[in-house]
Structures are given as structure tokens and as C-alpha cells.
């Protein structure tokens, strides 16, 4: 059974600081996704990582995938208040069905 | 493009009532999914479909049914609503050509009392 664990589940940061969110998963997969969710809103796709060693960056966020370690990271550089949200990683399974297993999410709060 | 749309946005049901949550997409995606999100939790897959006429169960299908008669629409039916079905329901769609990146609708917040 595929399990996806994120840590930390809660993260309070000061503006300007750096931090990393970790996403570990239990069985082989080469598809890893990061989503952002604002309170009361839907999920917004941030990154799609489809191969070992994949690295993608958008603004202050950078995501990477190590399929051998079954680990993805979401690195936040010089956090700003606008990054406050819940971040989910999701791992692909089930071959061609495109199914995802989601982690529980990391609630990020960036304080001035 | 409207993307993925869901109706209604909010609904309160009494125990034992039934309802259908509507989901439609205009991106010509073959793959569609229904999830539920409970407070403080990630999303759990209820049902999915890889094309018109093809549906299959996800992690938590009990108490729900789906149908897929067209590529665009993927309604979720709740029969005999129970308090345990109080949740936020999200519909999503994707296509293999986009790395199975799922696009989500705005959600339906359902309360069963």
C-alpha cells in the first residue's frame, strides 16, 4: 500500500527565512506533484516532477525529486507572507489511471 | 475555458437524504476523479473514470456512486446521506499528455445533519 508522509505538518516561519518541506513515500513511483491550497479554496498545481533528479523552480519555491530515496522536497527561499497556505504533495500510482495519493499537507504560516 | 466546474458550492442534507454533486470540464480530458477532504487532512480518492462509460472505485467508495456518460460530465451520487459524509468534495480532471497533472474544481462543501 502506498503511503505518503509530509513533514512538518505545521510550519511557522519568519519572513526572509529559508525552509524545506519533506515528502516521503513508501513504494516506487516516478510521478510527484506539489499543490497549494489557500483556506476555503481549491488546490492549485505548483509543480509536476516526472523523473529522478527533476528540479523545478517558480519564484521563491523550488521542488526536487529523488525517486531512489522516495523523497521530494519543497524549498522555500526568503519567505514572504503571501506564501502562507497549505502545501500538499501527491504521489502517482496505478499505472495509466493517473491516480494520486496525497500527503496530509503542511500548513505554512509566514509571519513578519 | 471554464476548466473544472462544480455545483452546488454548498449544501446541507438531512440524514437519509440523497443528492447528486455535479462536475463538468471543458478541457476534453478523459480522466476524471472525485475526492473528499476532511478537516486537516489530505484528499482521499472516492471514484475515478478513464473515459466515458468507464468508472472504478478509489480508496473510499462506500456510500457513493458515479456515472460517466459523456467526456465532459462526471456526477457523484450520495445515497442515504450519513454524518460521516460531511466533507468538502473536489472533482479533478487530467490527461496523460500533461503528465497526469490534475486540475481541480472549486469544491462542494457538504454538511449532513
Image: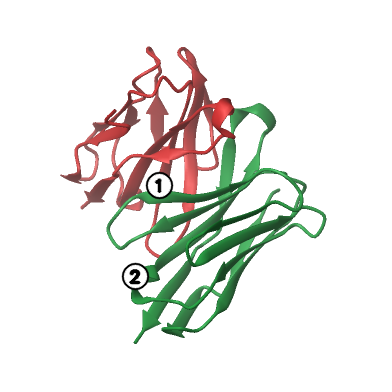
Chain colours: A green, B red
Left or right: B108, with A43 as reference point: left
> Which of the chains bears the disc numbered 1?
B
Decide: few, some or many residues near mark 2? Use Cα within 10 Å; few <14, some 14-19, many ≥20: few
Please, what secondary structure does the residue beneath circle 2 have?
A: helix
Instruction: Relative to A54, say whether A98 is above or below.
Output: above
Q: Which mark is residue B36?
A: 1
Q: Which mark is residue A82?
A: 2
User: How far apart in space, not on screen, are marks 2 and 1 (Cα)?
Assistant: 26 Å
Residue appearing at x 80%, y 60% in the figure = A69
The percent position of residue B64, horizontal first and vertical second, equals 39, 33
Residue appearing at x 66%, y 58% in the figure = A64
Same chain, labels 2 and 1: no
Residue appearing at x 67%, y 34% in the figure = A94
Decide: few, some or many residues near mark 1? Use Cα within 10 Å; few <14, some 14-19, many ≥20: many
Q: Residue pushed farthest front?
A: A59
The percent position of residue A47, horizontal first and vertical second, equals 54, 50
Q: Quadrant of residue A37?
A: bottom left
Visible residue check, residue B61: no
Amino acid at each position: 500500500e502506498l503511503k505518503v508522509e509530509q513533514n512538518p505538518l505545521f510550519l511557522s516561519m519568519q519572513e526572509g527565512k529559508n525552509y524545506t518541506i519533506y515528502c516521503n513515500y513508501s513504494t516506487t513511483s516516478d510521478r510527484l506533484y506539489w499543490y497549494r491550497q489557500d483556506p476555503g479554496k481549491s488546490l492549485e498545481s505548483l509543480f509536476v516532477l516526472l523523473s529522478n533528479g527533476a528540479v523545478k523552480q517558480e519564484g521563491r519555491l523550488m521542488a526536487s525529486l529523488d525517486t531512489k530515496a522516495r523523497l521530494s522536497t519543497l524549498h522555500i527561499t526568503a519567505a514572504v507572507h503571501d506564501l502562507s497556505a497549505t502545501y500538499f504533495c501527491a504521489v502517482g500510482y496505478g499505472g495509466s489511471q493517473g491516480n494520486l495519493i496525497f500527503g496530509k499537507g503542511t500548513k505554512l504560516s509566514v509571519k513578519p | 475555458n471554464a476548466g473544472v466546474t462544480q455545483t452546488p458550492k454548498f449544501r446541507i442534507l438531512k440524514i437519509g437524504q440523497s443528492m447528486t454533486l455535479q462536475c463538468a470540464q471543458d478541457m476534453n480530458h478523459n480522466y476524471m476523479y472525485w475526492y473528499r477532504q476532511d478537516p486537516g487532512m489530505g484528499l482521499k480518492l472516492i471514484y475515478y473514470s478513464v473515459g466515458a462509460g468507464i468508472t472504478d472505485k478509489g480508496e473510499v467508495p462506500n456510500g457513493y456512486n458515479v456515472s460517466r456518460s459523456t467526456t465532459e460530465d462526471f456526477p457523484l451520487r450520495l445515497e442515504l446521506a450519513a454524518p460521516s459524509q460531511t466533507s468538502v468534495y473536489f472533482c479533478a480532471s487530467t490527461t496523460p499528455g500533461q503528465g497526469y497533472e490534475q486540475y481541480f474544481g472549486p469544491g462542494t462543501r457538504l454538511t449532513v445533519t
